[in-house]
């Protein structure tokens, strides 16, 4: 049975910690100009049903650095987009490539795919979770601040795929998570309940930011929710991460955003570009963290 990475909860705490440590090692090796090509002749297939900059480029560059190859497959151009069953595509690709990444809408689609795939499947984002982003966010935290155990993280905004992955991360790495979402945009209750001893939930952004070591937000309308943009702008108006809100967090609190960011909507330019923001390191770490993940899954 292939080992998949559909959610952070597919890893034990120890495995997650070792991937984070390895990501930083791989980063130093790359920055030192060291060549490390353990995956020559290996191919990663990347299936995209949604747009991407960071996910695509980080996976593709990562495989190139490993001496392997990555295939970009858009649903617009494959038979999947014309209705070939997910299960048939999974079985065919499993016979041709060594590892598969998927970015899609329904989480169920990636589960159906992984159920029959015989090579590792990586979740590059679904409507439910975005676990690869958390590998990078956690790596960034560990590099800047050390262990996250016992720290306080604040999620401001939509109870979306990123928020769900933060909840899962809080369970695995034992940090406190304070979430503030508008009414009607709360996170999935089952995901929340499973981590209830780590989570404080409120509808008040200022309250959530208190005592925080890390403030995180994301767009108000995710991919696939574009028509809700106007309605969401109203609902989320008091959930902007701005300098005033950051004042309620600890003085040395960091700011993260998975990007792409909408300046002056969910975050102001001064916060995004300010001294507490680590968003560019966070984006770079997608590359290193996913290389550590690929290595983990292929060398198992
Ligand atoms: N953060 C993130 O996943 O970015 P992309 O949508 O550009 O891949
Ligand atoms: N929540 C966002 C994340 C983008 C990387 C989305 O799903 O569009």
Image: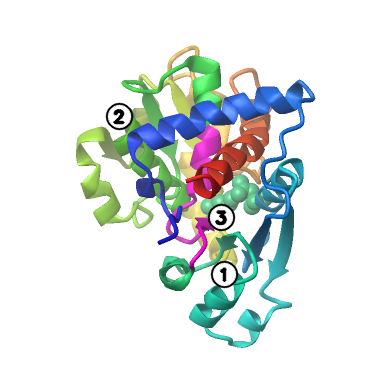
* Left or right: 61 in relation to 126: right
First along the sequence among labels 1 and 2: 1
* Residue position for label 2: 174
The magenta-colored residue range is 118-138
* Residue position for label 3: 124
Q: Is residue 79 magenta?
A: no
User: Under tag 1, what secondary structure?
Assistant: helix
Q: Residue at x 25, y 55 (%)?
A: 190
* Residue position for label 1: 94
Quarter location, residue 166? top left
Mark 3 vs mark 2, CA separation in Å: 24 Å
Does the rendering let one see residue 218? no
Q: Is residue 170 above or below residue 251?
A: below
User: Under tag 3, what secondary structure?
Assistant: loop
Q: Quadrant of the N terminus?
A: bottom left
First along the sequence among labels 1 and 3: 1
């Amino acid at each position: 049975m292939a080992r998949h990475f559909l959610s952070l909860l597919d890893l034990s705490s120890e495995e997650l910690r070792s991937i984070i440590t390895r990501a930083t090692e791989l980063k130093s090796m790359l920055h030192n100009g060291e060549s490390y090509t353990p995956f020559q002749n290996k191919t990663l297939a990347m299936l995209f049903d949604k747009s991407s900059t960071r996910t695509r480029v980080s996976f593709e560059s990562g495989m190139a650095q490993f001496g392997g190859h990555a295939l970009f497959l858009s649903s617009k151009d494959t038979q999947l987009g014309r209705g070939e069953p997910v299960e048939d595509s999974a079985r065919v690709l499993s016979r041709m490539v060594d590892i598969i990444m998927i970015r899609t809408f329904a989480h169920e689609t990636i589960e159906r795919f992984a159920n029959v795939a015989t090579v590792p499947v990586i979740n590059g984002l679904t409507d439910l979770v975005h676990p690869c982003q958390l590998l990078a966010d956690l790596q960034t935290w560990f590099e800047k601040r050390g262990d996250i155990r016992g720290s306080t993280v604040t999620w401001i905004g939509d109870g979306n795929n990123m928020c769900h992955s933060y909840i899962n991360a809080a369970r695995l790495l034992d940090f406190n998570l304070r979430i503030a979402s508008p009414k009607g945009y709360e996170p999935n209750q089952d995901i929340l309940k499973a981590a209830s001893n780590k989570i404080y939930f409120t509808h008040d952004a200022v309250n959530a930011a208190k005592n925080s070591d890390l403030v995180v937000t994301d767009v108000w309308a995710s991919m696939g929710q574009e028509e809700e943009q106007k309605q969401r702008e109203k609902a989320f108006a008091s959930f902007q991460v701005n300098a005033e809100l950051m004042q309620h967090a600890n003085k040395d609190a960091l700011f993260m955003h998975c990007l792409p960011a909408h300046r002056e909507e969910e975050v102001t330019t001064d916060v995004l570009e300010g001294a507490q923001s680590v968003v560019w390191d966070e984006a770079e770490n997608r590359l290193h963290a996913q290389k550590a993940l690929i290595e983990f899954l292929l060398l198992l």
